[in-house]
Amino acid sequence: MKVQRVALRNVGLLGDTGSGKTSLAEALLFSAGAIERLGSVLDGTTTMDFDADEQKRSRSLSSALATLSWKKTKINLIDTPGAGNFVADAFACLRVLDAAIFVIHAGSGVRVQTQRLWQACKELGVVRLVYINAMDAERADFDQIMNDLTATIEDNSIIPFHLPLGKGPAFAGVVDVVRQRGLSFQAGGRGEVKPCEVPEALADSLAATRERLTEAVAEADDALLEKYLEAGTLNDDELVESLRAAVRQGSVTPVVCGVATQCLGAQALLDLILDYLPAPNERPPLRGAAPGNGAEVLRQPIDEAPFSALVFKTMADPYSGKLTLFRVMSGILTPDKVVLNANTGEKERLGQLNNLLGKNQLTVTQVSAGDLAVVAKLKSTTTGHTLCDEKEPILYPVIEFPKPVISIAVVPKSKGDEEKVSSGLRRLSEEDLTLQFSVDHESKQLVISGMGEDHLDVVIDRLKRKFGVEVEAEEMQVPYRETIRSSVKVQGRHKKQSGGRGQFGDTWLEIEPRERGSGFEFVDKIVGGAIPRQYIPSVEKGIVEAMKRGSLAGFPVVDLTVTLYDGSYHSVDSSDMAFQIAGSIGFKKGVEQADPVLLEPIVNMEVFVPEDAMGDVIGDLNAKRGKVLGMDSRGKLQVIRAQVPLAEVLKYATVLKSMTGDRGSFSMEFSHYEMLPPHLSEKVIATSKKRGEA
């Protein structure tokens, strides 16, 4: 029975850094004839790692798209980064994939990013297939990887479709479990496959594995189960058809193997993609919302439906300008079409449409439902936006990106380059939504934030290479605050006489502490016209201005009530400015007398770590004055929830990487302010005074 092949597949390569995703992409492109020579990651000659920073570091830093054709089926292939600092790009691509191939290095096993991405695929309904790479490695052990997968992923759907022929350097092919035949891989070519005999030593493993597959599909189909119980087996065609449905439903996850750098198994994998992985029009209806009222809108993923598309990536091209990568979710798109950006409400004209082969653009005349493409020079459209027919609008959920976890302050090496640095960062942040930058209004520092030190190193390198500006890091200032612990009553009096009209303002203030986080309150209790009504807002304005720099270390003052309860004025010399100054003088004097203290920012953290590293991580958080609030399990990962002073975790990405062997990750967000211990306050105050003198 011949399996009917649908003409399109969208497949992503996912997994940890170093697993061989880019090498596998190269092997698939070469085997399908999309490229003429097989590139190498180490030599910097692969199709997908075309960025200079990727070639310099010999690893993917951003997702890349390439199109190939295999047996009259178009396959859109997305190669995603696996390093923790850059893996957010992979999560964004999941929104436009129908299937994910998880690449696992036979010598390294299953690591943390694979676990996180696996869970995300399950939540989004993305079908999975596992490719065990580097089967020719000395330590390669197929059975051990299978045990590791089962134990780590905790997914009983994972079943081998291939069993290896030969171990380590002797690896030469596989046994096709479904068809019960041997497949010999030809070295030195484009991944050609030749039939061969199944070794007698593998007969028992083949029988047991095929029985697992048969039972897995029979249990999901009553008619098939009845036939299986009667006959004790299913024929090849019945099993293939049933497995295709089971894989699309996620109840069976195929495991195959090969050697990407030598193209061993590449053509066999291409056949599996066509036979088992879903086409876009086999996915459920798409869910979106009506712009404006938010009512749910369902859209069929077919050519006949109204046009809609989701933007999943933005790139800066030196020749074409801004490139927008998108998936047509429904309908058909042709060049020069005017569409609606449902997020901004603006219209965009889409010019020439292209497919991508790494950095190369291939012009196309139309893009059908489910297909991926790229267009240049859109004005207001960015990653996560929905493009649609303005007569049939729809808004798809935006792509959520993780918040940055590390920040550094930078200064241009050359004076006068501030605008060039800001412009460069603005361009880079359009491509990379995990990169954020801002000028801290207190410290006046330019702060860039990202997913880790490696991420920010790449940003600094790209500023130099792409925009010709160099920056250097400087110590980042923690945003401390100041407050008071006792109440005082003080006079703020300003009197100046220097010929002509003088200045006079006289205020009496009561300053009291408030609950932490409650902010500032100004209370007017003036009676009997002691201060004219028109001057009272000026008193408050002077106090608010004085609150910007506290008496201890120059940080903003927070959480207090200031009551204006008395004062006096001069009918000629009083003015708005005079009462502003009087209010400021009284406030500064009162804060100095009201037992001022420093407050430090506390952040909420979620730390994801393997179980064997949990003790070290908790101990380190305690040593950082953190409070562990609780722990949860997510698969084999432990999630530690804690509150920690921000000053202690400014470089936590590096610390966690060292403690967990790059197997951990974390997120954090601001929670509240707490009083800084006295011995640490002394250090902060001393540092602040030195900075002020400098």
Image: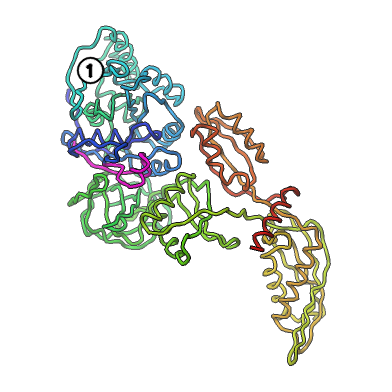
Location of residue 238 in the rendering, given as x and y in whole percent from the top left corner: 23, 20
Question: For residue 54: magenta?
Answer: yes
**Is there any visible trace of residue 494 in the rendered image?**
yes
Viewer-nearest residue: 351 or 63:
63
Q: Residue at x 38, y 59 (%)?
A: 468
**Is there any visible trace of residue 94 in the rendered image?**
no
The image shows residue 99, relative to residue 327, as above or below, that is: above
* Residue bearing the label numbered 1: 179
Q: Residues within 10 Å of mark 1 (few under 14, many from 20)?
A: some
The C terminus lies in quadrant: bottom right
The N terminus lies in quadrant: top left
The image shows residue 86, relative to residue 438, as above or below, that is: above
Amino acid type, mark 1: Arg
Location of residue 501 in the rendering, given as x and y in whole percent from the top left corner: 73, 90
Q: Quadrant of residue 185?
A: top left
Q: Quadrant of residue 92?
A: top left
Highlighted magenta segment, given as a residue range? 47-69
Relative horizontal placement of residue 544, taking residue 383 as reference (left or right): right
Circle 1: element type: loop
